[in-house]
Amino acid sequence: MTSTTDNTATTDNTATTTADRYAELADGFGTVLDAVDSASAADEGASRWEAASPCAGWSARDVVGHVIDTQRSFLAGQGIDLGAAPDLTEPAIAWRAHRAAVGQILADPDVAARTYDGHFGPTTIGDTLLRFYGFDLIAHRWDIATAAGIDHRFTEDELTSLETGADGFGDALYADGVCARIDIPAGADRQTILLARLGRRA
């Protein structure tokens, strides 16, 4: 899934914005991965990557693999080959390699502006990367941090982005294998409410 904060990837003159916005989202995701490495180092090298995440059946490492694999699959479906998949032995390093590969293809303005028929109608590669896969780049930060025992707080802008995305997805958000419906706790703060909408308990 991904972010709705920037839907401007539909014309050549906004391709740079698409590349910059993807880089911003990707770097924010990478910062959380680096924090997991730092926490593991503080544990004298005991890895936190195998810890169970809030995503049922997935470790923190698995979540990183999911984010990489879904982006690669989407781009492959659009005829874009990113080369060999990165080795997930060191997830933060794997992410940087993937981020660089996607950044390289987005440097071509024709790629971001390329149109195709998406799940919600005609769209572009750039818009899909930001709207759907960018959503994952924000939401899954919390999953990975939580698995590693790190308290992660979304910024107000990130909360707005996720709320807008959830609104736009509608009932598709609760399709099989996406998010579960859970009750929102009484008196919950904005982040807890958002997480509940995404099937997560703070």
Image (cartoon, rainbow, N blue to C red):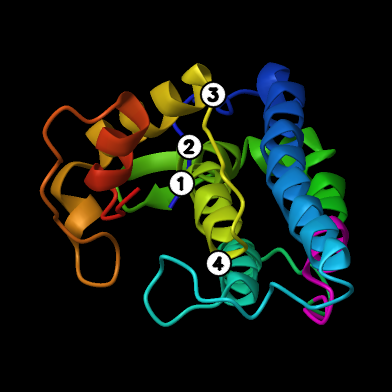
Q: Which residues are magenta?
A: 86-97
Front: mark 4 or 3:
3
* Nearest to N terminus: mark 1 or mark 4: 4
Question: Which numbered mark, 1 or 3, is in the foreground of this view?
Answer: 3
Q: Are marks 4 and 2 in contact (CB under 8 Å)?
A: no
The residue lying at 26 percent from left, 42 percent from top is 169
Q: Nearer the viewer, residue 202 or 31?
A: 202
Of marks 3 and 2, the one in the foreground? 3
Callout 1 secondary element: helix
Q: Which mark is residue 155?
A: 3
Q: Position of residue 47 (x, y in %)?
A: 76, 76
For the residues marked 3 and 2, what is the alpha-carbon distance in whole angstroms? 14 Å
- Say which label, 3 or 2, has the lower sequence index: 2
Q: Name the kind of residue labelled 4 in the image.
A: Thr
Residue identified by numbered label 2: 3
State the image quarter where residue 134 is shown.
top right
Name the mark on residue 59: none
Residue at image mark 4 = 70
Sooner in the amino-acid sequence: mark 4 or mark 2: 2
At a point 38% along the width and 51% down the height, the residue shown is 118
Q: Crowding near pointer 4: few (<14 within 10 Å), some, many (20+)?
A: some
User: Of helix, strand and loop, which one carries label 3?
Assistant: loop
Which is more toward the observer, 84 or 97?
A: 97
Please tell me which residue is depicted at 31% across the width and 37% down the height of the picture.
192
The mark nearer the N terminus, 2 or 1, is 2
The answer to whether the residue labelled 1 contacts the one labelled 3, judged by CB atoms less than 8 Å apart, is: no
Q: Amino acid at mark 3?
A: Thr
Which amino acid type is marked by label 1?
Phe
How far apart are labels 1 and 3 at the CA level? 19 Å
**Real-space CA distance between mark 4 and mark 3, rounded to the nearest whole angstrom:** 25 Å
Which numbered disc covers residue 132? 1
> Against 177, is 50 above or below?
below
